[in-house]
Image: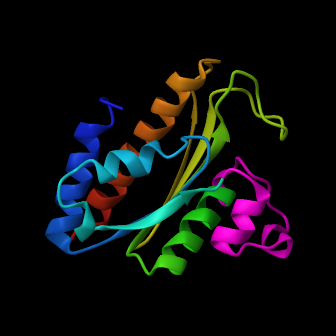
Amino acid sequence: MQTLLPVAAKVAERLIARKESVAIAESSAGGLISAALLSVPGASAYFLGGGVIYTANARAGLLGLTPADLTGLRPSTEAYALLLAGRVREKLGATWGIGETGATGPTGNRYGDSSGHVCIGISGKIEHALTLETASTDRQANMRAFGLAALEGFLAALDKAGS
């Protein structure tokens, strides 16, 4: 968690200065993205909420995504991460949405991705997606790496979008 906090503080600074907000739909990071953003004082000014979308039931119940919404998609892809990001942004009325999906480990996921695979989607003033492969089977290390990649990717998107 300590590695995420400095990046979360930079994200918070930019969101507060711009009067923008964020909503999170994370999976394999297990809530670390949200926790890092919420650890910054003043989080209520920019953090609208989110959830750990770890199962199909969570996907349907929290985001309202149906099997029809997933036609042609599979979890743990950039396209799916962007779908999560866009949906959570829309549902909570945020300026930005972050979607994260992957295989934390120690084994791969049922979609054929190896442990250490994550896709992150950012939806807002711009859309951006990225994939990270840590090649690690260490579940906790992967969760931290996934959270950090999401925050760093979001920070880069904020900088690219400007004020």
Specify start and end residues of the magenta stretch as a single range: 54-79
Give residue 58's quadrant in the image: bottom right
Question: What residue is drawn where x is 21% and y is 75%?
Answer: 19
Q: Is residue 126 above or below residue 159?
A: below
Q: Is residue 15 above or below residue 140?
A: below
19 relative to 70 in the view: left or right: left
Residue 149 lies, in percent from the top left, at: 44, 39
Instruction: Please identify the quadrant where the N terminus is shown.
Output: top left
Question: What residue is drawn where x is 23% and y is 38%?
Answer: 6
Q: Camera-side residue: 149 or 66?
A: 66
Residue 41 lies, in percent from the top left, at: 17, 54
Residue 57 lies, in percent from the top left, at: 77, 62
Magenta span includes 76: yes
Q: Residue furthest left?
A: 17
Question: What residue is drawn where x is 74% and y is 52%?
Answer: 75
18 relative to 158 in the view: left or right: left
Colour scheme in use: rainbow
Instruction: Please identify the quadrant where the C terminus is shown.
Output: bottom left
Magenta span includes 145: no
Q: How many marks?
A: 0
Give residue 91's quadrant in the image: bottom right
Residue 10 lies, in percent from the top left, at: 21, 49
